[in-house]
Amino acid sequence: MTIISGLRTADIRFPTSTQLDGSDAMNPDPDYSAAYVVVQCDDGSEGYGFTFTTGPGNDVQLAATTALAPLVVGRPVDTLVEDLGGIGRVLTHEPHLRWLGPEKGIVHMAIGAVLNALWDLAARRAGKPVWRLLAELSPEALVDLVDFRYLTDALTPAEATDLLRAAQPGRAERTAHLLAHGFPAYATTPGWLGYPDDKLVRLTREAIADGFPLVKLKVGADVDDDIRRLGLAREAVGPDVLLAVDANQRWDTADAVAWMRRLAPFDPYWIEEPTSPDDILAHRAIRQQLAPVRVASGEHIHNRVMVKQFLQAGALDVLQLDAARVGGVNENVAILLLAAKFGVPVCPHAGGVGLCELVQHLAMFDYVAVAGLDDDRMVEYVDHLHEHFEDPVVIRSGRYVAPARPGFSARILDESIAAYEYPGGSAWTAIRGGA
Amino acid sequence: MTIISGLRTADIRFPTSTQLDGSDAMNPDPDYSAAYVVVQCDDGSEGYGFTFTTGPGNDVQLAATTALAPLVVGRPVDTLVEDLGGIGRVLTHEPHLRWLGPEKGIVHMAIGAVLNALWDLAARRAGKPVWRLLAELSPEALVDLVDFRYLTDALTPAEATDLLRAAQPGRAERTAHLLAHGFPAYATTPGWLGYPDDKLVRLTREAIADGFPLVKLKVGADVDDDIRRLGLAREAVGPDVLLAVDANQRWDTADAVAWMRRLAPFDPYWIEEPTSPDDILAHRAIRQQLAPVRVASGEHIHNRVMVKQFLQAGALDVLQLDAARVGGVNENVAILLLAAKFGVPVCPHAGGVGLCELVQHLAMFDYVAVAGLDDDRMVEYVDHLHEHFEDPVVIRSGRYVAPARPGFSARILDESIAAYEYPGGSAWTAIRGGA
């Protein structure tokens, strides 16, 4: 019998702040980082997971991850991977750590990292990528992954089962389509706030030429700059290409409405994170005042209870779930079911470190087995740091190619860990030496 | 010029789980703990603050507290204590740590602990208890403490100023009344879920005899037990005494309504935390269905943006703010202003370790300078662990006596730290030796 023998962690940080990659109105100098966790088994097999952070605090995130070890270490792997819903509930409802949330912030993200590592392990053992492992589960097995606590006023287990059963007949056809054509992506690479205008225009043109149907620009620091930058991008791509904007929580309601009315001449497709990710009622108010511009959010919506309310309140046009913010695959299955129930398209957040790698699996599972749709749906794509992963995403003609390798595409290469582990890795030593 | 020279932390845990003190439907075995922080100045003066936790994870909470040190250490004390609003915004909006919330969970509670320690320091230097320091500030100075980001759709700085100015004329009279009569308290000590029936009845009778106007019972584990326990308590006190119940987030909406209808014959005054503290819409639905039973929540409502929405949605009858869950005194000033704007009474959460000590100051400030009312308002009181504080709360005839000593009543005695620091303190060594 194989047993979970340990949780190993690594503090991995990339010095992205030196290039202004990832700069936006709220995050001027992120060092994209992973609070990385390895679930170790006594037969030598491993599963990989992480939380994405922006540098400082990555160590605190790892301390929370380590605090979960007693709940996992010593358990038999077979029973764990056969009941991932059960271990999800154990981790989420452990009362002492729950007090530090509940179901939000550092502890909840640590639970997500550990659960995602268990999913990576389960998929490796099953010899399948996570999207396929999920998409081949029965409706009943999928429903059992979900923690329905606090959800039943919007979605019951019976409704979720019916919804999944209704999507069953098309699974094989959609899997074939996915394998042949991949899943739509959109590009954020051109639009970082710190980039000069010529770089913005050049990268936007390249993204459209590469086949991406939508380019996203960061906004929210200075309205005149935003008018100029969005105008340049619109001029570069013409009237028919989709351009979205992202304020990274910068505004209050009135500011969001006033600012976006000034950007309206450039026909933005959505405004992302116009205000606090906690503010369901403000998102609803902004949506009502800005229609037909869509309102999008999700990368910081901290759990299924919040997602449920955003949907109940009619506060979102586009749900941008994140693979590493909530309680792992389990909670994202709940979130996908809620979105399907309310008919809101899911366009997952990605970028950072490895978020593209993870979240493509969830979008593909959603397409094959939950929503059954890929119209109006795309996964964010940012083109950096993929080279540090064992199974990096592949983009072809503006679409994610379906991963074939077993696992969750979550493993970071050993040589990258050696270089970027903080503070002792060779890249950090070199930076300090060269300063 | 005095400088902040360091942040010292201590992991203090009390073995309360051995007595079932603090047991409820979601927290069966808490070891009441403090993630304790000491702000040290280079002249030897200190300020004290903490986050309350239930034991495991207290070390993670301290790791987050330590991560804030670079934002505070090295600053001149005079400019800090003269602009506590400014340092509050610095701590809240530091982008890398903000990513780990934002404004929720471990990082946000750590910010609260550090800010509360700075308030303790400021009050000690001013020679006043925190409630009086706050209650003697001008409306403009109070408004400057508040971070209005994400609040302006419900409360603007101008409205807050007007509200505080309207309360100014009665400040002196209310201060005199407070000093003479104290502030109303209510008792939770009798009602822990783990207590046998005879202890429940005895402690309930004693609390009423001691002058408390309301006794609160934990519910939510077993409905038949709750009917029996609430019936015994009602029989013990007669029809005119207030009895409240607290489900500690146990239910979904339909469960809450069904369960509370079975308890209705015993005339519960409020149902506290019927469901997830994130679920604004569920609280509103429960409130609509259970009226005239009041709906109360707050100890886990994680920031001012959530409080704002609970009030905007009409989801609460009673707001139970917590001194150590949100971003310190600063954010609680915002929360008190919001409650006053919406006319919802504040009955603060307390208990745990030192929460009574802290929150009495906020309730007294609210009475003197914000809401100006003490009808329908009371502060929770639980009778354990006060002996570990330098300036413990004093209860007289069921009321909190206004603290006179300078500071925030937040300092834990050196001998208590020596005994209960985890894992090396003498009390813990003795427990392990005796096991």
Image (cartoon, coloured by chain):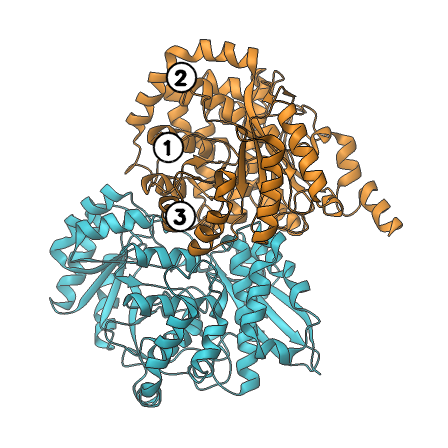
Chain colours: A cyan, B orange
- For badge 2, the amino acid type reads Ser
Disc 2/disc 1 C-alpha distance (Å): 18 Å
- What mark, if any, has residue B138 been given in the picture? 2
Viewer-proximal residue, A357 or A189? A357
Left or right of B412? Residue A204 is left
Say whether disc 3 or disc 1 marks the residue closer to the N-terminus.
3
Location of residue A297 in the rendering, given as x and y in whole percent from the top left corner: 32, 58
Number of marks in picture: 3
- Mark 1, Cα crowd under 10 Å, few <14 / some 14-19 / many 20+, is many
Q: Nearer the viewer, mark 2 or mark 3?
A: 3
Kindly indicate whether the residues beneath marks 2 and 3 are on one polypeptide chain: yes
- For badge 1, the amino acid type reads Leu
Chain letter belonging to callout 1: B
Residue B404 lies, with reference to residue A353, above or below; the image says above
Circle 3 SS class: helix
Circle 1 SS class: helix
